[in-house]
Amino acid sequence: MDNKQLAVYFIAGTPNCPKSIEQTLEEAIKGGITMFQFREKGKGALVGEAKKETALRLQLICREAGIPFIVNDDIELAIEIGADGVHIGQEDKAASIVRDKIKGGIVGVSVHTMEEFEEAIKDGADYVGTGPIYATVTKSDTRPVAGTSLIRRMKERYPEFPVVGIGGITLETAGAVMEAGADGVSIITAISMADDPAEAAAYLKKEMQ
Ligand SMILES: Cc1ncsc1CCOP(=O)(O)O
Ligand SMILES: C=C1C=NC(C)=NC1=N
Ligand SMILES: [Mg+2]
């Protein structure tokens, strides 16, 4: 996949959106996000048919905008609706198994150490997400806050492999993540909870250029 696709990688689920998630996604797309991940987790998260119907609506919005639609964790849902890819964590199935199931799709893996990074590359991941770069309240069970040093080391070792930073990244700190060598920033709150998600996305897009 093209590393530039990771520049402004918006992630959201219904619990992260004060407005409808469809409206938030449309505004973020207007602002110029380059990729979207549906991560339906946390208090009040949708399940079953409701989750699938929302995923289909969000996928259609992404298709019309020409940006990749990625499903977090739920490999079965991703395959069922023909999503562009999946993002999995260390606790999910091994990337190698997902790689086979998703065939030509995008497989993203969360990594927190150089060893996990090298394993993900070996398993055929298309990109990795690493963090939390800064403190975040959005995900409760994160690994310790990492800062940007691991991103720097990963890029020194594998300059071409697509890496996106995630965790507590705001409009003020996105530049530092980029400066550390990341191909982009993965963001939930700074876009989904912004008064104007389009303006937040547009600012980040400019920062990432
Ligand atoms: C999914 C995830 N993985 C590590 S931190 C995080 C949450 C990021 O959310 P926010 O951008 O609101 O800090
Ligand atoms: C935990 C995560 C790490 N990185 C990305 C891109 N998405 C996630 N859900
Ligand atoms: Mg997971």
Image: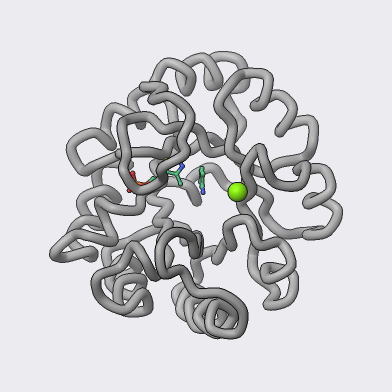
Q: Residue at x 49, y 74 (%)?
A: 46
Q: Quadrant of residue 20?
A: bottom left
Residue 156 position in % (x across, y down)? 54, 14
Image coordinates of residue 202 in percent, x first then y, are 23, 57
Q: Front-most of 89 and 171?
A: 89
Can residue 53 be spotted in the picture?
Answer: yes
Q: Which residue occupies 70% across, 46% down? A: 92
Which quadrant would the C terminus be assigned to in this image?
A: top left
Query: Is 114 left or right of 101, judged from the image as shown?
Result: left
Seen in the picture, residue 91 relative to 79 is either above or below; the reply is above
Q: Nearer the viewer, residue 15 or 150?
A: 15
Marks counted in the figure total: 0
- On screen, residue 134 versus residue 100, left or right, reads left
Indicate the position of residue 71 as horizontal and vertical percent values: 59, 62
Determine the image quadrant of residue 181: top left
State the residue lying farthest toward the left.
195
Q: Is residue 66 left or right of residue 135?
A: right
| Residue placed furthest toward the front | 43
Q: Residue at x 41, y 39 (%)?
A: 166
Q: Note whether 172 is above or below 5 in the view shown.
A: above
Q: Residue at x 55, y 20 (%)?
A: 154
Q: Is 191 drawn above or below residue 146 in the view shown?
A: below
Residue 149 percent coordinates (x, y): 42, 16
Splitting the image into 4 quarters, where does residue 191 fall? bottom left
Color encoding of the figure: one colour
* In-image side of 55 versus 90 (left or right): left
**Residue 59 appears in view:** no
Q: Using the image as rendered, state which of residue 95 and residue 161 is in the foreground.
A: 95
Above or below: residue 67 compared with residue 160 = below
